[in-house]
Structure formats: C-alpha cells, structure tokens
Amino acid sequence: MRASVGIVEGELLRMSRGKRMASHKDALVGVRLNLKMVFGLLVVAVTTVAAAHFLREYWIDRNAEGLMRRADQSFADGKFTDAIMMGGRYLRLRPLDADAILKVTDWVKESSADSRTLFQLLQLMEDYLVKDPTHKAIRRRTIELSVV
C-alpha cells in the first residue's frame, strides 16, 4: 500500500508540473493589455514633454529680455564693451531680431571694437541674411562693417 501511494504521489507531481507548464503557456496567450493605463501613461508623457518645451521657451525669452535691458543700461552708462558682449549674448538667443542686430552694429561702430567682436557680429548678420536676404538695412550694415 505504501508503494502504491508513492507511485500515485509521483504521478500527481508529474501531472501538476505538466499542468503548471500548460497553464503558463495559456497565460501567455491570454495576456491582456490595460488600455486605460497605457493611455494614461501616454497622456502624462505628452503633457510632460509639452510643459518642458514651453517652460524652456519661457526661460529663454526671460533671459533674452534681461540681457537686452542690461545691454541698454551698460551702453547708457558708457560701458561699450559690456553692452556689446550682452548684446551678442542676446543675439545668440534671438538671432532673428533685426532691430537688435542694428542696435549692436551701431554700438560696435561707436566703440572701437576689436576684430574678433567685429567678426562675430558679421557672422550673426550673415546668418540673418541667409534667412531673410531682403532686409536692406542689415545688408547695408554688413557691407559697411566688412569694408572697415
């Protein structure tokens, strides 16, 4: 009787292992996707990316405005080098601001800026002219500065 119990237990053990494997395979076939969770994660991801984009734009605009205010103040105080430096930083943040390009060009003309500063300003002006070649005032100033 004892031997038959051991055989039965062994058979049950083998059968249960086989069942576990069969149920595991069946579980993989019946995998369900939680669509609410996937949609929620997608909404959170898109919202986070959009918020990061707009926050970055806000800070760039805020920094640019502060740089231009400081540049104007430095120029008014007679610190031409500081004004040109801050104006150049402003133009790196907002390279398509034609009025600022013309203002910084005037500052460079009034001060005796070194050739490196002049070259950097010419590069900014040429980059602007690539994007908008019809701006006559910037074209004229670019020619004037390149001849100097």
Image (cartoon, rainbow, N blue to C red):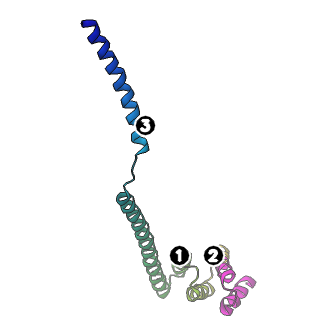
Instruction: Give the left or right position of residue 117, taking residue 16 as reference.
Output: right
- Residue 129 falls in which quadrant of the image? bottom right
Q: Mark 3 falls on what kind of element? A: helix
Q: Give, as a three-letter code, the residue at label 1.
A: Leu
> Which class describes the residues within 10 Å of circle 2: few (<14), some (14-19), or many (20+)?
some
Residue topped by disc 2 = 117
Residue topped by disc 3 = 25
Residue 60 percent across, percent down from the top left: 46, 74
Q: Nearer the viewer, residue 66 or 119?
A: 66
Query: Is residue 15 shown above or below 110?
Result: above
Q: Nearer the viewer, residue 35 or 53?
A: 35
Circle nearer the N terminus (3, 2): 3
Circle nearer the N terminus (1, 2): 1
Q: Residue furthest right?
A: 147
Q: Give, as a three-letter code, the residue at label 2.
A: Thr
> Which class describes the residues within 10 Å of circle 3: few (<14), some (14-19), or many (20+)?
few
Q: Nearer the viewer, mark 3 or mark 1?
A: 3
Q: Give, as a three-letter code, the residue at label 3.
A: Lys
Residue 128 is one of the magenta-drawn residues: yes
Residue 77 percent across, percent down from the top left: 46, 86
Q: Which residues are drawn in magenta?
A: 120-148
Q: Mark 1 falls on what kind of element? A: helix
Residue topped by disc 1 = 93
Circle nearer the N terminus (3, 1): 3
- Residue 100 falls in which quadrant of the image? bottom right
